[in-house]
Amino acid sequence: MSRKLKIKATLLALFVVASVVAMGFIVAALQDDISVENYTVDIKSEMSELPALLQAADEENAQNTQTYDDIYASKAESVAFLANNNTGYEATDAKMQEYKDLLSVDNVLVVDRAGNVVAKAQDTPAEFSYSRYNQLRSVFETGEPSEGMEVDFAESGQTMRYYAARIDDNTMVVIEQDPAELKELLDTTGSHESVLRHLSVGQTGYVMAISGRDYTVSYHPDEACVGIDALDAGIQVGDLEDGNYKWMHFNGERVFVGVAEVDGTYYLGVVPFSEFVGSRNLTLGVILFIFFSVAMIVALYGIFVNREDEKRGYNPENYTNVGPLRYNKAIGRKAIVLSFVGFLAVLGVTFYMQTLFSLSAESVSSNDRAADIERAITSAREQASDLTAQYNERYLGKAQVAGYALDANPELRADEAKLQELSDALHVQYLFIFDGAGVMTETNSPYVNFTLSDDPSDQSYPFRQLLQGVEYYIQDPMPDEVSGQLRQYIGVVLHNQDGDAEGFVQISVRSERLENLLASVNVENVLDGIQVGQNGFAFAVNKSDNTFAYYPNSDLAGKDATARGMTEAQLKDGFSDFVTIDGQRYYASSFETDDYYIYVAQPESELMTERVPLTLTTAFSGLLCQIVIFLLVTFERRRTIAGVARKDAEGESDDDPRMIDVEMPDGRTEKTESAASRWLYRSMHWDEKSAEQRVLTVIKVLLSIFAIVVCAAMLFQDRVFTSESVFSYILAGGWERGLNVFAITACIMIACCVLTITMLVQQLLRLLATVFGPRGETMCRLVSSFIKYASIIGMVYYCLMVIGIDTTTLLASAGILSIAISFGAKELVADILSGLFIIFEGEFRVGDIIAVGTRSGTVMEIGIRTTKINDGNGNIIIIRNSEVSNVVNMTKESSFASCDMQIEYGESLERVENLLEKEFPHIRERLTAIEEGPFYRGVVSLADNSVVIRIVAQCAESDRGPLERDLRREMKLIFDRNGINIPYPQVVVHEPRVFQKATVMEQRAADRFNEEQKEASQAILDDDNDFDLADVSRR
Amino acid sequence: MGKGRKPALVVVAALVLAMVLCLVGCGSTQLSDSGQGTLRVGVRDDIMNFSYLNERTGKYYGLEVDIAEELANRLGYADVEFSTVTPDDRKERLLNGEVDCLVACYSIADSRLENFDFSPAYYTDGTRVMVENSSMIADPAQLGGKTIGIMSGSNAGPLLAIKLNADGIIGDNIISNDDAGTQYEGVYVKKIASYAELSQELEEGTVDAAVMDGAIAQGFMNDERTLLDYNIAEQQYGIATQKGSELSGRVAEAVQGMIDDGTIAALTDKWN
């Protein structure tokens, strides 16, 4: 390689590397920008929802606390009621213990105005005389039960809630209760944690909360991070400002953060850098690989051609001078094609990768979101059933207190005013007293004259069991027939003074809390307000009639989904693909509940916004680099014409050139590989290749690298891809079968994998072939070609399935198809079968010398369909296996060259034979190809014009042709030297002469002779036509 | 490479070395002027946003920490060494010279000016009364006859007494005064060792109200507590230095500079 070319190559290499690096930075920066923009929007939308969510959670908490307080306040009131209604109340510890058990609370106390404990079920840590407890004392002024108050006792580590109700002017009842149950409820349902847990940003992002007071992390999805100092973890205090969006560090990880401040707490929408990198690096890698490949191919092509020119000399016709530079037309023409195709490839690949990644990001987030909603629905269901159970227990408690009061003082049963008082104390709506016959005797409700129904289908019927010894009955909440409100009835048996059952008391309660909760499980409520990405939403389709159960645009609600563009195939669980609704395309993921298919949908246009600018920028910078490389490759400094004369200076030293020039149909001259070299397993030497072939080799290598990398990545996917990666998503196969970008990607990946494996197996077979000799070679070639076909057919079949073509119908139709094909392809089938028989019967093998009909040569390859024979002149004869018949396998240890010579009849045969005896040793000496002989085989025939003798000599089969020619030459020379003539057709010209006429006598005699002869020969039969046969049968 | 380049390289290296030495020399002379390289600052470790010690890292965070660092920077110190002071020991520690200055929510008061020099105030706060909602105290007048807790060593006690006396809630006489508390005519002021304990006593009801600076009170507020609308006294936090020390003037000047150029306002905003 000349110094100039070296410099040029170095320059090109540097430029290619530099442009790849520059390109990497540009694309990475662009993608980061776009990602940051997307995440900013994402975080903003989350943050804008946050205050409402937190407020809702706070309200929920307030409601839960209120409900809890109501229950315990009502317990305090119940005790006050019992104390004031002659039910055996006395201010003793034992009575308090009884009440404590009845009410199932932690402690019941009677406290006087000053704060002294009069009676208690157990000891209390509280000192009621402190003004801290003034709130309890307020019952003396208002007469109403006090609100709950909570005190932490550091020493004993207890937390207690207190409720008071007034007994008389000087004493009150105080209920002491550990609010653990309440705390748990608040934590699970209404805490900010429970809100934040359901928020997500991007795919792996999350929302965390930092206390504005002490900058500790008050919520983080990772439990270990809760409570740590955020400033310590890397957050700058100055960055914690509402509406701040920037890169920060948290726990040593680079994260993109959006900050919102709500009520003194900073909420941070956090996207880890790894997510950026995860989605970016693979895209970037693929784009850069393609870009690099294209740039390298063009550059290498230029260098190869230059190098070739250097070797072979310059052809001035290929150059055009442009100022001080000159332009290489030969390179330019092809380089421009390569550059253009490369540019298109970069454009296409970038667009494809962007589509893939934006789609997969959306698809993964849709799926995540769908899973979130599913979880939310399930948990709301569970919560509802938990809450129902909890309420049942509480209401039963109330009914039991009512039963206790009414048992202790039966007079109350008939007093409507007292019943009203009791129901107020218990915080229930109505009380009903039934006697032993199931007839309602008294109530504080407007309903009168009621008797339990005898009809098992009636709501009141089950309460009859209370008359038959069952202690209590809790009916499930049911909507009221009149108002539709949820109402619940609970009955507890009453007893007479002897302790025998005597009717029952029934309470009627209305729980708005439960009602609200059950309503919130409703699909409309769950889906309403769900926002996915920027414009995404959720909707539900009824399973039974395919109507929209919920759709953000209320016009569509109740309409038939299939009439609005959805298809039956899309109405299923686990759907994940595009749907069209009212002409708008959405990317949707679905899951099913008992009654609905629920979809999370995002508009298509939104998915694709980022790919266009990125693709264009990549393509543009790619184009610039291509142009520079093109210029570098095609232009060079003008130099002296000294090199021109060197054309063909280096002779074609190769004795067996594998590269030859061919003229293309359009007149161009191209280099091509000779037929004989194509089916050799031996790869061509690099130096023998033309520039184009070298480029092809480079492309092949690049493609192989790509395929191997993809294959390796697939095999080690767990280690290569994170679970959020698009490839994991594709490999997991969660997408919809059909002609979409995921299916195509999957096909490419499968193809890479199959091709890599096929390639490896073929290489292995090739190695094996060298070990096992001709038979092995034959088998290996066959297996190798079988693997090739099988893998390609299998791959195509599988890919078709992936793309969504129904392969079972394909198989079924293959049955019909095969009949159709079998007519058209019977020759093909015959070829394949023949091929198999050739191989298994061992008719011939690779390397054998065979003759098929008139064609003979060395077997190069026995394929599935054809057999290839090298005729020894470098021509490859391709014979269909079905046509391989009448095979002469001439592979033997040695062959014979034979030479027939004609001698005039006049020549003495003995003289010739003596001559031959004398000359044979000389022939043997001169013709080294002769292994044995030559031999004289005698007279072969007495022909028309000559006596034919034969001379043979033993030789290798491959030498037979040349040797025969040499033998003939020798014989001719010998004959010439010794004056032996070889007859040849001669024309002898004679003078014309006058013929004499026959006499009459002679004519008669001739006639007679003819007749006589005919009669005489009548008896003789000429079966074999022997008389007519000339001796020409043998040559 | 030519032989001639080697001496050139040596010359360049020598020049660079000389410059570095010169720089180091300049630096050391500058530091030696101030006598020492480290400013020792006494700060609190329990007041969120002012000065709070993260025990995991041993670092302090907050407005006062930032101010102290900025101060050291302006005074030309190379480093700042923080140590925790409490209201009980801060006086002694400064007097004994264990710290050079106090940036510790230390309010400028006449009694303190006798012993220390103060910089101009960098933060103005009010002393507040915190009560539990359940005690139903909503009016300062209701404090009569109650037990009020203060952090021992803080000047909240005397200020409270003066204010309550001025508002006619307590009488003029001090009935008794010891380490546990002071019995005024009308209220008992209980001295409690730490703010955390003070908060706990308020929670359990052993004190009926707690008096502390607003900045500190914020750290102990929750939904069930109220700060009475009753400003006992305005507190101005300043940096305290030993009386008449050479540092006093420079500290005052630097703080005034920080106030004038908006540094203090920016830092206050940052930690707000």
Image (cartoon, coloured by chain):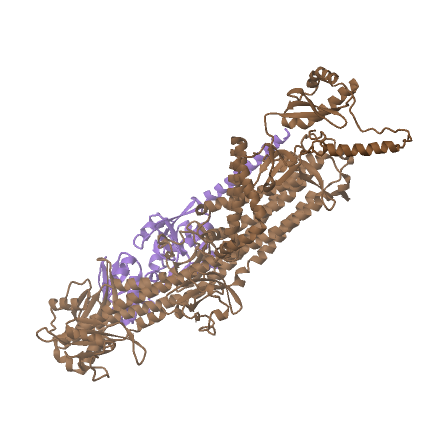
Q: Is residue A916 above or below residue B259?
A: above
- Left/right placement of residue A224 relative to residue A139 reads right
Q: Position of residue A1027 (x, y in %)?
A: 71, 31
- For the point 54% across and 50% down, the residue is A284
Q: Give whichever of A614, A664 is nearer the camera.
A: A664
Q: Colour of chain B?
A: purple
Q: Give whichever of A950, A572 is nearer the camera.
A: A950
Q: Is residue B91 above or below residue A569?
A: above
Q: Position of residue B33 (x, y in %)?
A: 46, 44
Q: Is residue A776 above or below residue A711?
A: above
- Left/right placement of residue B167 relative to residue A681 reads left
**Residue B212 visible in this rendered orientation of the protein:** no
Q: Which chain is brown?
A: A
Q: Position of residue A974 (x, y in %)?
A: 75, 19
Q: Position of residue A670 (x, y in %)?
A: 70, 41
Q: Give whichever of B252, B187 is nearer the camera.
A: B187
Q: How many marks?
A: 0
**Residue A235 visible in this rendered orientation of the protein:** yes
Task: Name the quarter where the C terminus of chain B is drawn.
Answer: bottom left
Task: Name the quarter where the N terminus of chain B is drawn.
Answer: top right
- For the point 77% across and 44% down, the residue is A320
Q: Is residue A966 above or below residue A273?
A: above
